[in-house]
């Protein structure tokens, strides 16, 4: 149960005067992303301003600079309503000061309201953007028109917030200020020495400072009030991860024993030798498996660095110790590819492998589930279907998650609960900057794969303007005659009226007359059978060009493909370009990647394409992507902004995240159930920042 003193923070915005169901829905859409979720005071209090409007420039009409926001004091002279029935003509009010005359212009205005607000002969303070029409001062739709009494309380520095349809800045601000009324003062959860050293205010005071800035510098990402709240959010995140980690470690693991024979025969059956970083990651995993604690390890590797082999060796060790292993992939296509790539190896060394996806027939599913429960399957590969209640393992010792789409901390816990003391290995193919590893996987130990397997040649990356398309097609013809295979990626499936870019269907239609049956098409709207047929024809049949959308971004493995053409490359993020490029260069032949762009290029697009030409190092690219684009895209979840974070910024606040991580570990060591005085205050922090699942975990544990 949430403590009573937090009720004032979590009360619905419907409790504020003037907020009805319609306005509450707009707030819910803005603050919680869904009209069905109730917006609460804390949601609005943590909704940060992004800039300010400065109305402090008070000027005479004659000296008011054009285009600037000004506040002028004028006398109202005359009202000029539009002719009856003609709504296209604006309503005008004429006014003056001692230096010049002013026209106030209103479209679709309510005349009665304006007549009452602006009586002739009265003095009014008017604030808005000054324009000059044929040299004469004019303000269209002023932001404020107030008398002298109201001017005394009018905000001259006004914060600007992200908004949504049905919500104006004035309405948002009025309700935000009302949120502060009647808030309980909270006990301090931060260390007093830290607050004194950084000069940080209390939580409530920092909120007030950010929502009532005196200038743009008060909203700076490193302003003290913003840093205080960002650190609160970092600590809430890291404390939740530490509590999860502690709970998992506390539930006893199994110190696994195996003789190493299965691993040895597996390594002997490989047609290549493992890289040093693969061997290092395997050593990390084996050290974890031998401990009487549950393993929580993340294996991070670049495209084609061999994560699957690390996972397979880990599975072999656990199977040799007498338990089962399972591997979960994000899509049906990828699960089947993983199964195909390990099936022959498993058969050679005597590992009984199976597959389970949502697309299996009922009879197949029943047979697989029965074999699994009886212990007749050692290694099961599948999609989310693996973790439905109907799936029962005889003894699940290792869960491997191929994490193209991030699973949250709580899904990770659900996974491990399928067995008595299941160890967990998470793999990610997107190199993630250290800051984001801390943010999303702070509960896990990390192994890095930094080398490519031996014999892989570097990929030559070039940029080319779409104006030179004819030249590219004739070079491609020459390469195909020599037996090359080529991916051709387009950003859209079909033509769009909104975007002037080539779709996959149109590009396929334009290449077909030249290359005939040597061209195949694949995109996300095709059925699974259509996709499989196109893919098989490209991999093993006559097709040499595969026109595709980004459906081929992850996991598609055709060693013979040596050319990657990415059309409208300027529209893709760096991480995505890097993933796509990683589809070639998987065999021993030299490969190339051509980034086709449509000029003129913006600054960020140019930097992206240059970065792709300069390096193949996924970690360097991920850091650049974080800098250029924001955190969301690096993890492939959304376009920008740290998922689940409202105030902290991965790049600007990475030092705070490091401090928070150490502090969280220390807190959990000293007070693992948060029962002390500071522990109670820290529980408030977890509730306020939406990390209270960790508290429920404490109670369950």
Image (tube, rainbow, N blue to C red):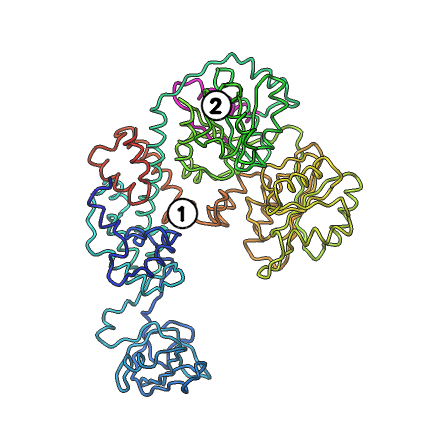
Q: Does 257 appear above or below 663?
A: above
Q: Nearer the viewer, residue 665 or 192?
A: 665
Residue 217 quadrant:
bottom left
Q: Is residue 98 left or right of residue 588?
A: left
Q: Residue at x 30, y 47 (%)?
A: 228
How dense is the environment of label 2, judged by Cα within 10 Å: few (below 14), some, or many (20 and up)?
many
Residue 649: which numbered mark, if any?
Answer: 1
How dense is the environment of label 1, judged by Cα within 10 Å: few (below 14), some, or many (20 and up)?
many
Q: Position of residue 440 (x, y in %)?
A: 42, 38
Q: Does 56 appear above or below 311?
A: below
Q: Is residue 494 left or right of residue 623?
A: right
The boundaries of the magenta stretch are 276-300
- Where is mark 2, residue-wise? 285
Q: Position of residue 236 (x, y in %)?
A: 32, 40
Q: Secondary structure at mark 2?
A: helix
Whether residue 655 appears in magenta in the rendering, the answer is: no
Whether residue 281 appears in magenta in the rendering, the answer is: yes
- Quadrant in which the C terminus is drawn: top left
């Amino acid at each position: 149960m949430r403590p009573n003193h937090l009720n004032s923070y979590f009360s619905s915005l419907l409790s504020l005067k003037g907020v009805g169901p319609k306005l509450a829905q707009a707030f819910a859409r803005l603050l919680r992303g869904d009209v069905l979720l109730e917006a609460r005071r804390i949601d609005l209090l943590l909704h940060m301003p992004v800039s300010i409007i400065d109305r402090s420039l008070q000027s005479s009409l004659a000296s008011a600079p054009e285009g600037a926001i000004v506040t002028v004091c004028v006398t109202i002279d005359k009202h000029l309503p539009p002719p009856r029935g003609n709504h296209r003509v604006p309503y005008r009010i004429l006014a003056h000061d001692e230096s010049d005359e002013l026209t106030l212009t209103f479209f679709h205005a309510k005349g009665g309201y304006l007549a009452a607000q602006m009586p002739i002969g009265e003095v009014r303070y008017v604030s808005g953007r000054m324009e000059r029409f044929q040299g004469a001062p004019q303000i269209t739709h002023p932001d404020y028109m107030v008398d002298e009494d109201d001017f005394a309380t009018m905000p001259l520095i006004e914060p600007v917030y992200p908004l949504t349809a049905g919500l104006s800045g004035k309405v948002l601000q009025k309700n935000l200020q009302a949120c502060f009324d009647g808030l309980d003062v909270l006990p301090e959860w931060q260390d007093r020495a830290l607050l004194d050293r950084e000069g940080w205010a209390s939580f409530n005071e920092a909120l007030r400072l950010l929502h009532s800035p005196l200038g743009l510098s008060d909203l700076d990402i490193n302003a003290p009030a913003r840093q205080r709240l960002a650190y609160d959010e970092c600590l809430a995140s890291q404390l939740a991860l530490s509590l999860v980690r502690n709970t998992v470690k506390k539930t006893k693991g199994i110190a696994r024993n195996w003789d190493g024979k299965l691993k040895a025969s597996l390594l002997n059956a490989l047609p290549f030798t493992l890289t040093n970083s693969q061997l290092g990651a395997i050593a990390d995993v084996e050290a974890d498996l031998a401990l009487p604690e549950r393993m929580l390890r993340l294996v991070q590797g670049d495209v084609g660095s061999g994560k699957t082999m690390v996972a397979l060796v880990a599975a072999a060790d656990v199977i040799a110790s007498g338990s089962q292993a399972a591997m979960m992939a994000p899509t049906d296509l990828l699960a089947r590819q993983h199964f195909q790539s390990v099936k022959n190896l498993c058969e050679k060394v005597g590992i009984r492998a199976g597959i389970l996806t949502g697309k299996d027939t009922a009879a197949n599913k029943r047979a697989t589930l029965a074999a699994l429960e009886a212990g007749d399957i050692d290694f099961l590969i599948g999609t989310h279907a693996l973790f439905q209640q109907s799936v029962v393992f005889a003894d699940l010792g290792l869960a491997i998650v191929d994490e193209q789409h991030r699973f949250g901390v709580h899904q990770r816990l659900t996974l491990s609960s399928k067995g008595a003391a299941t160890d967990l290995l998470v793999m990610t193919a997107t190199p993630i900057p250290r800051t984001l590893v801390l943010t999303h996987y702070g509960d896990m130990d990390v192994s890095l794969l930094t080398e490519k397997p031996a014999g892989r040649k570097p990929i030559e990356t070039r940029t080319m303007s779409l104006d030179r398309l004819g030249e590219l097609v004739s070079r491609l013809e020459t390469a195909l005659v020599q037996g090359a295979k080529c991916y051709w990626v387009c950003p859209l499936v079909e033509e769009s009226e909104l975007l002037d870019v080539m779709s996959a269907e149109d590009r396929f239609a334009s290449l077909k007359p030249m290359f005939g049956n040597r061209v195949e098409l694949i995109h996300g709207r095709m059925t699974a059978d259509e996709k499989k047929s196109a893919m098989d024809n490209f991999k093993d049949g006559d097709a040499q060009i595969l026109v595709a959308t980004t459906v081929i971004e992850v996991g598609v493995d055709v060693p013979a493909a040596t050319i990657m053409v990415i059309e409208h490359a300027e529209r893709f993020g760096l991480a995505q370009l890097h993933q796509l490029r990683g589809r070639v260069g998987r065999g021993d032949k030299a490969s190339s990647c051509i980034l086709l762009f449509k000029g003129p290029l913006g600054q960020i697009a140019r930097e992206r394409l240059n970065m792709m030409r300069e390096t193949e190092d996924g970690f360097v690219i991920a850091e650049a992507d974080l800098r250029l684009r924001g955190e969301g895209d690096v993890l492939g979840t959304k376009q920008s902004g740290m998922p689940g974070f409202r105030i902290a910024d991965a790049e600007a606040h990475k030092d705070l995240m490091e401090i928070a991580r150490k502090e969280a570990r220390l807190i959990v060591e000293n007070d693992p159930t948060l029962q002390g005085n500071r522990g109670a205050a820290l529980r408030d922090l977890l509730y306020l920042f939406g990390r209270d699942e960790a508290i429920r975990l404490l109670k369950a544990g």
